[in-house]
Amino acid sequence: MFLGRHSHSVDAKGRMAIPAKFREPLGLCAVVTRGVDPCLSLYPMPAWERLAEQVAALSIGDPDARALKRLVFGEAADVDLDAQGRVLLPPELRRYAGIEREVVVVGVHGSIELWSPERWAEVNAAVDANAAEFASRLSALI
């Protein structure tokens, strides 16, 4: 399980260190892809395989399903942790997420989100401004 938030740098080659406490649950091989929000999602292989099966099972006759398949699979890339616990983020994914020299690494239970610091601050500001409304709308779930 991935919990917490960490800030890390991205080197000139596009590599970023995975927080030490995330390395074991992530494993040596993972998949990174575009997130639904303007961030990247990093999945350990077992979580990726579950998600991939669910998305692949969606009907090709549904335009929303086709769009989701493109979003999830079209930009996905396999990544391997190197001996220093780093992964190489593909340039096109870094551009999509606005990640340059710094990255905010956020544990979201079964996966990890990678955010540019600026976009993370915007998302947090929106959550802070609307926390009571979110809690009210989601109260049936908790």
Image (cartoon, grey):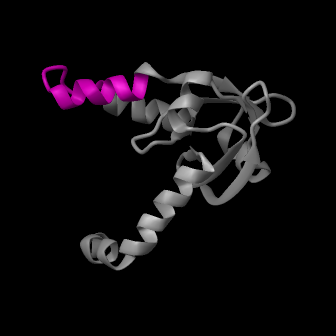
In the image, farthest residue toward the left: 61
Q: Nearer the viewer, residue 20 or 39?
A: 39
Picture residue at 79% right of the left edge, 49% below the top: 20
Magenta highlight on residue 2:
no
User: On screen, 127 above or below 58?
Assistant: below
Q: Main secondary structure of the magenta part?
A: helix
Magenta highlight on residue 68:
yes
User: On screen, 102 above or below 30?
Assistant: below
Residue 138 coordinates in the image, percent (x, y): 29, 70
Q: Nearer the viewer, residue 13 or 54?
A: 13
Q: Does residue 106 appear in this view?
A: yes
Picture residue at 32% right of the left edge, 25% below the top: 69
Residue 116 coordinates in the image, percent (x, y): 60, 46
User: On screen, 118 above or below 14?
Assistant: below
Figure quadrant of the C terminus: bottom left
Picture residue at 66% right of the left edge, 40% below the top: 26
* 15 left or right of 71 in image: right
Q: Does residue 142 appear in this view?
A: no
How many marks on residues?
0
Residue 141 coordinates in the image, percent (x, y): 29, 69
Q: Nearer the viewer, residue 72 or 55?
A: 72
Picture residue at 51% right of the left edge, 42% below the top: 39
* 9 left or right of 65 in image: right
User: On screen, 138 above or below 15?
Assistant: below
Q: Nearer the viewer, residue 54 or 68?
A: 68
Figure quadrant of the N terminus: bottom right
Residue 33 coordinates in the image, percent (x, y): 50, 30
* 123 left or right of 112 in image: left
Q: For the magenta stretch, what is the residue range? A: 56-73
